[in-house]
Amino acid sequence: MIFGDGTGWKTLDLRSTYTPVTTQAGLANHALSFGCHYDNYFLDNQSYNTLNWRDGEATSFANAFVGKTQTQALYAQDAWRFLPRWKLVYGVRYEDWQAYGGSQALPGKTIAFSDASQRHFSPKASLSFDVSDDLSLRASIGRAYRFPTVGEMFQGQINGSSRPRCAGHRLHVYAIFCSIMID
């Protein structure tokens, strides 16, 4: 069975939401959303030497870069309008990331990488105030993770190291927004 279209990408996102029946602010005004995410990327690049790079025949093996990454995630969010002009949005995302099956090769030399994995929780919260029907102010805080792509993990040049080069990034976000509706 074959999934995907040959690009090396497979993704799936599912989301469900609940919207309150009342539009009045208060304890019952919670808009909930939750969902899951899955992605799987693979790299399988093999290069061959040739005398004519445009349309020549492959003469001998030059190099190869192989590996896979996968992310599975769950998230939940609540948007609570607790007063007529005030809204609190808070949520969390859990991610389980893996890199596996990686190797780099030259003629006569192959470097196999050990598998890697990371698991993180990413919380976020924002508080907004509607100054008027056309003006809104919002303050947000959150933490997120950017995991390495399959290319960042396994593609490149062979350097003799025993580990892939990229570890990903942790982000802390603090933001203040002003939204103006213009007719």
Image (cartoon, helix red, strand yellow):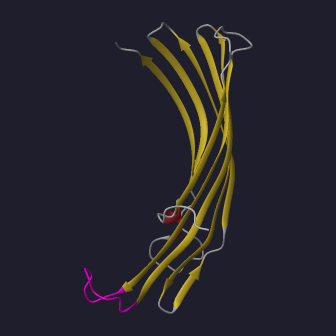
Look at 50% across and 8% down and name the residue there.
131
Q: Where on the picture, by quarter, is residue 92?
A: top right
Confirm whether the magenta stretch covers residue 134. no
Seen in the picture, residue 71 relative to 61 is either above or below; the reply is: above
Picture residue at 60% right of the left edge, 43% below the top: 144
Instruction: Provide the major secondary structure of the magenta segment.
Output: loop
Identity of the residue drawn at 56% across and 71% down: 67
Indicate the quadrant containing the N terminus: top left, top right, bottom left or bottom right.
bottom right
**Residue 58 within the magenta-colored segment of the rendering:** yes
Q: Nearer the viewer, residue 157 or 2?
A: 2
152 displayed left or right of 144: left
Q: Is residue 114 above or below residue 124?
A: below
Place of residue 45 in the rendered image (x, y in percent of width and height, measured from the top left): 46, 75
Q: Is residue 91 left or right of residue 170?
A: right
Q: Give the x, y percent position of residue 57.
A: 31, 89
Q: Which residues are magenta?
A: 49-60
Quarter holding the C terminus is: top left
Does 175 sit above or below residue 51?
above
Quadrant of the rendered structure where residue 115 is?
bottom right
Spot occupied by residue 4 in the image (x, y as percentages of width and height):
53, 61
Residue drawn at x 59%, y 72% as measured from the top left: 163
Image spot of residue 76 (x, y percent): 69, 35
The residue closer to the viewer here, 178 or 42, is 42
Residues 90 and 164: in front is 90
Residue 3 left/right relative to 156: right
Count how many numbered circles sit on residues in the image.
Answer: 0
Q: Is residue 51 above or below residue 176?
A: below
Q: Seen from this angle, which residue lies furthest front?
A: 1
